[in-house]
Amino acid sequence: TPREPYGGYATELLRVERSMRLRRQRLLSLLAPGEIIPTLPSFPMMGVGDFTYPSAEPNGPIARSEGIPDLAINPHPRMHTLTANIRERRGSNVDIRMPLYKDVATPEFKGLPRWAPAPEVRGDAMAYGMGSCCLQVTFQAHDVHESRFLTDQLAALAPIFLSLTAATPIFRGRLMDRDSRWSIISAAVDDRTPAERRAADEPVDESAKQPALAGEGVRRIPKSRYSSISHYIYDCPAARMHHKPNPFALVSDLGYEVDEESEATLLAEGIDESLARHVAFLFSRDPLVVFGDRVDLDDATQTEHFESLQSSNWNSVRWKPPPTMDSPIGWRTEFRPMEVQMTDFENAAFTVVVMLLTRAILAFDLDCLIPLSKVDENMRRAEERDSVTQRKFWFRKYLVAPPLPAERAAMSCANRNFETEEMTISEILNGKGDYFPGLLPLCHAYLESINCDASTFAEVKRYMKLIALRAKGSLLTNAAWQRKFVAEHDDYLSDSVVSPAIAHDLMQAAHEIGTGQRACKEVLGQVIVEPIHPVDAWDVKLDSSRVDHKTRHKLLEQYSHRQSFLSRLRKQTSDDPSALGLPRPMPQSASTPVSHAHTGHLFA
């Protein structure tokens, strides 16, 4: 996270990569010998044998996991409390199940009957998910309406960028038949009771009710707390002004739970239905962490109780109101699906392009919304192996509404064409036919429309080129590169097992790629990462405090004995101007005035 938000000028886009490189450099400067910082979403050997330093045994009182020791959990009280409370509310350990990749010698598939369930890689602790790393970007909006509009638009883009940034093909030392962390995290924080997880047609078990829980623990909840969004939140102002139904409700086609009392309260206070149901959706969950000294707060002036729910509903995008009533921070949208990449160039490229897409959507009045049922389907496809090149995704066929007569222009949002079709990611990014321009050309057009300066434009083009080539399949995703690395390793036995030796070499290679010590044309193409070194990582203050007498005397004595100092001193005190590199003076006459023009050189 940067120290402060980036500004609103095009040149600020160039700060993103510089900031990321500086942070990596500072991390490098703090490492002990033998330590590295590869930026991959997950450690491949997490939950396999003795994987922590110092060594620690699993089955501790907090996680109660057969693979994760409590020592591996962040020591902050929030993380310990989350781990324990998710398990307690659920009534059991979490149940993570990821499909195992079938290679030619994977033992679990040998002799497996066709009717048998496919082999899985399993996990039982929150740390498997919350121990992952990702690339999240938060955007400041002009006002509450713009923030809601962007939240919905970015939700439709989430699966596309999850696929493009896929970087997690390994889980617990095994190759998965998935490329992303998303389902791992979703299952890792799933605190729903068995009754809340029941099928839609399954009746409520009255004996399962728990009055202390939200919805008594039996209100059916279709998704984990970590999931794609379940509803759009934008409310069309023109439709409301003309007493028409909100057109965006047509594509918000998923059933989702709400707290009825919260919804009724908000509607009674004049909050529009879309926003009222969104907040009521958050309040349908129980808070997972509340610190004891923060229970009795004035909710009229503080939002901490709201944030305790808001911050533990981890959706693909998050709508973020100001953190306090008097905060200078405004209305924001957080884009959450992307996986962290090996290099700062890649991470900056995706950050900048998503940022430009938000600007293009607003400036050109684009509309990416599709039915949320199709967004969910896209999220499932995005996790699949090699989904960038092997899958198609539902997307909006026309991003710009056709021109309307003047009498209907005011109702433009109520006359949206939500027609969709399946496209490859290359078509979505680079364009299709003569009716779909592509997201990257739209970013290019936006930069031209604002007269972006040449240096910024040139660097952003490099970012867009990387993403365009990845969308086409010309460059590998981080996940595809990791699979290739494992498959080509001398220790790999084609059995879907990532051994400690393979994992060690993989992490070392990723670290070297991230720090510019190793080229990786398969992922980066012609991009060269300038090496990052741990020296000079921190700013040095021009301190004006006095140096003590003893230190000052020692420094001056050491300096006076340096040959370079003595040489300069002799030159500066020489009567011969040529010793200073100056021309010899011309002979003076009565008519030649004396010039002092060179006097300043003596002090240069």
Image: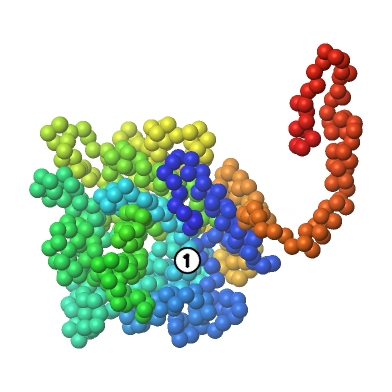
Vertically, is 194 above or below 142? Answer: below
Q: Is residue 581 in view? A: yes
Vertically, is 181 above or below 398? Answer: below
Q: List the single residue furthest toward the front.
A: 590
Residue at horizontal 38%, vertical 51%? 139
Q: Choose between 410 and 178: the one closer to the eye.
A: 410
Q: Choose between 245 and 170: the one closer to the eye.
A: 245
| Residue bearing mark 1 | 132
User: How far across and how far down the image is residue 501, in percent?
Assistant: 63, 68
User: How far across and how far down the image is residue 104, in percent?
Assistant: 52, 64
Tell me the SS state at disc 1: loop
Q: Quadrant of the C terminus?
A: top right
Residue 601, image quadrant: top right
User: How far across and how far down the image is residue 381, in percent?
Assistant: 36, 57
Q: How many marks?
A: 1
Residue 300, image quadrant: bottom left
Residue at horizontal 44%, vertical 63%? 181
Residue 427, image quadrant: top left
Q: Amino acid at mark 1?
A: Ser
Q: Is residue 488 in view? A: no
Residue at horizontal 51%, vertical 46%? 15
**Is 300 displayed left or right of 170 in the figure?**
left
Q: Choose between 534 and 522: the one closer to the eye.
A: 534
**Colour treatment of the image:** rainbow
Q: Choose between 526 and 567: the one closer to the eye.
A: 567
Residue at horizontal 11%, vertical 48%? 244
The local crowd at label 1, few if under 14, some if 14 to 19, many if 20 or more residues have their Cα within 10 Å, is: some
